[in-house]
Image: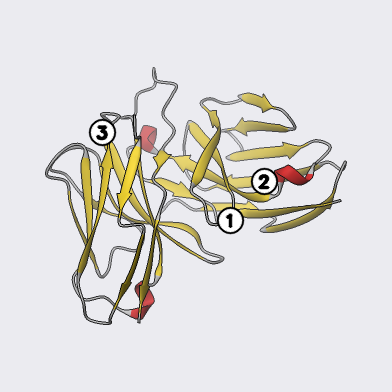
Amino acid sequence: ELKVEQNPLFLSMQEGKNYTIYCNYSTTSDRLYWYRQDPGKSLESLFVLLSNGAVKQEGRLMASLDTKARLSTLHITAAVHDLSATYFCAVDASGAGSYQLTFGKGTKLSVIP
Amino acid sequence: NAGVTQTPKFRVLKTGQSMTLLCAQDMNHEYMYWYRQDPGMGLRLIHYSVGEGTTAKGEVPDGYNVSRLKKQNFLLGLESAAPSQTSVYFCASKEYYSRDRSNTEAFFGQGTRLTVV
């Protein structure tokens, strides 16, 4: 059974600070996704990471993937209040024969002025 | 394009009642998923389908049934609702897996908030 662990689950940070969210997973996968969810809303795709060493950046967010370590990170640079949301990583194990898309429990980020 | 549409958006059921949630996608995606979201639990996979006429169990399938008679639709049924099934339900769809494909993220519907009393 594929397990996906995110940490931290809760993150309160001041505006202007940097921080990293970690996503560890338990089985072989060659692709991983990051999503954002605002309260009461659906999930919005942020990044698609397709291979070992993949790095993608959008604004103050940067995501990376290390398939050998089974680890992805979401780095936040100089946080602003608009980044307050819950962030999920999701692991696609289709390449290993399992077609399930498994999510972590999410990291609730609060950016404080 | 509407993307992924869930019907209904809200519903209140009495214990023991049955209902069907409908998920429709217009992106010609092969894979479809049903998740439930509960506070502190993230999204947990209920059932999924990798093509028309196929379904498979996910992490928390008990108490639910699904059908995928048409490629664009994925139905989630509750035969006898229980208070433990109070949750927000999300449907998602994505392209089939291929090493050559890059745009394979899942697209989500707006969610169905279900309360069982």
In the image, what residue type sits under mark 2?
A: Tyr
- Asked whether the viewer can see residue B109, the reply is yes
For the residues tagged 3 and 2, is the chain the same? no
Q: Helix or strand or loop: what does disc 1 sit on?
A: loop
Residue where numbered disc 1 is placed: A39
The disc numbered 3 marks a residue on which chain?
B
Furthest residue toward top: B100
- Asked if marks 3 and 1 touch (Cβ < 8 Å), the reply is no
Of residues A22 and A25, the one nearer the viewer is: A22
Which picture quadrant has residue B104?
Answer: top left
Q: Helix or strand or loop: what does disc 3 sit on?
A: loop
Quadrant holding the N terminus of chain A: bottom left
Q: Which mark is residue A71?
A: none
The disc numbered 2 marks a residue on which chain?
A
Near mark 1 (Cα within 10 A), the count class, few <14, some 14-19 or many ≥20, is few
Q: CA distance from mark 2 to mark 1?
A: 21 Å
Q: In screen coordinates, is B27 left or right of A105?
A: left
- Asked if marks 3 and 2 touch (Cβ < 8 Å), the reply is no
Of residues A4 and B21, the one nearer the viewer is: B21
The x, y position of residue B114, in whole percent, is: 37, 67
Q: CA distance from mark 3 to mark 1?
A: 29 Å
Q: In screen coordinates, is B63 left or right of B98?
A: left
Q: Residue at x 18, y 36 (%)?
A: B71
The disc numbered 1 marks a residue on which chain?
A
In the image, what residue type sits under mark 3?
A: Glu
Residue where numbered disc 2 is placed: A22
In the image, what residue type sits under mark 1?
A: Pro
Q: In screen coordinates, is A113 left or right of B76?
A: right
Q: Residue at x 39, y 21 (%)?
A: B99
For the residues tagged 3 and 1, is the chain the same? no
